[in-house]
Image (spheres, helix red, strand yellow):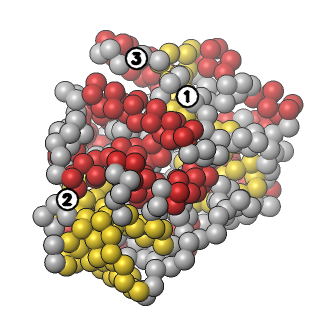
Amino acid sequence: MAPSAMSRWTRALSDAQPVPYWLDDPGRPRPEPALTGAETCDLLVVGGGYSGLWTALIAKERDPGRDVVLLEGREVGWAASGRNGGFCAASLTHGLANGLTRWPDEIHKLEELGARNLDEIEAAVARYGIDCDFERTGEIDVATETYQAWELRDWYEEMERRGLADGVEFLDAEAVRSHVDSPTFQAGLHDRKGVAMVNPARLAWGLKRACLRLGVRVHEHTPALALQPYGVGMAVRTPYGSVRARKVALGTNVFPNLVRRVRPYTVPVYDYALMTEPLTDEQLASVGWKNRQGLGDSANQFHYFRLSADNRVLWGGYDAVYPYGGRVRAEYDDRPETYAKLAEHFFTCFPQLEGLRFTHAWGGAIDTCSRFSAFFGTAHRGKVAYAAGYTGLGVGATRFGAEVMLDLLAGETTERTSLEMVRKKPLPFPPEPFAWTGIALTKWSLARADAHDGRRNLWLRTMDRLGLGFDS
């Protein structure tokens, strides 16, 4: 990178606040009081992100008389649920390609359940009056290299052969640039129905309000410290009290699971994003973007980008940073070298926006597992259920995971619990230093593939055969 270019791009970051844009909101609700003393309930939900919020809400919808308590260690929506890109996808499998590779016999059912799940999210937003800028705009996967354009066309043709292309359209360079104009775009795959845009923090806060309205007792600034059997149920210890419950649902995702044997199945990945100042009418016209779709590019080290309600551009992705030992620490949330890299990539994609400033730059941990999509299970003789491993596509899929956890706790055989995806787990990650070494080699190999027309080396081909990987 030339020094002049570096200074030009970093100047655009000079006023950026190191806080998530979505959480920097004057409408952020006050936290509910921490738990003090001993409580009892029918269902205890641990975690105040999407996973826990949907579980508590649906539990009350299924049985209004059920006594539900939700514990959150800090504030509802403060972590991955409130600082993500706001892409709410129908896919339950981290994209159709991943799902087709892993569960080819179930893929049509998984796609049907995913579409139904997204419809249910939209219905809940309307039913509870959640003001979260929910827009069913769809998404375009764009090719920025010639080989990626050919791969997108081949993939679209395979989707058509398998009857999985409903609502999807292949776009050549002229067509994709008529939607969003970048000199780097060579082709696109437009999913018109399967993705919505949303303000992620406001969605979390709206779900919290809906839970409270239905009678869920929410305690924030109340970390769950330990889980153990207690009589016919379970007990969870907190700093100032405890909760005894008949059943427990764990929605802690990237944070250490209270069921220790689940922990090796996930590792934290740090993802980073920028938000621009609002585009002027002239700037927006120079880009197009009339239909406000979300976009993502087709590289292994990919970017995701979208418009906010006030026409800011969120630009994130590319670096996926795994800290040695899998530690989740606040100091990893801020990474200036990644912000500079993202700024360079932004203006390469949209040179017509040079001069635009970034107002926010932030990062944070998400959980990933070796199959890139959520896994599920029970512990303590069916009295505890968990879901984790959403790998960056949890805005929509966590609602499905909540339904699965409630089915498992009820001991019911449903169309969800019958799925191979639900019944089987991914391979766990190895202990250190093997995890860090394997992930570092995989990241190096993915970057090398991006630089060599997508050609995957022996390491990646071996990982493919074993069904293993690393992704954000």
Q: Is residue 31 left or right of residue 90?
A: right
Q: Give the residue displayed 16% in from the left and 51% down from the top.
A: 411
The earlier-in-sequence mark between 1 and 2 is 1
The CA span between labels 2 and 3 is 35 Å
**Residue 68 x, y percent position in the rendering:** 38, 63
Q: Is 419 rendered above or below residue 85?
A: above
Q: Give the residue displayed 56% in from the left and 45% down from the top.
A: 128
- Which of these two is toward me, 155 or 86? 86
Q: Give the residue displayed 65% in from the left and 55% down from the top.
A: 22
The CA span between labels 1 and 3 is 14 Å
Q: Give the residue displayed 43% in from the left and 70% down from the top.
A: 71
Q: Residues within 10 Å of mark 1 (few under 14, many from 20)?
A: many
**Residue 167 x, y percent position in the rendering:** 47, 18
The earlier-in-sequence mark between 1 and 3 is 1
Q: Amino acid at mark 2?
A: Thr
Residue at image mark 2:
378
Residue at image mark 1:
138
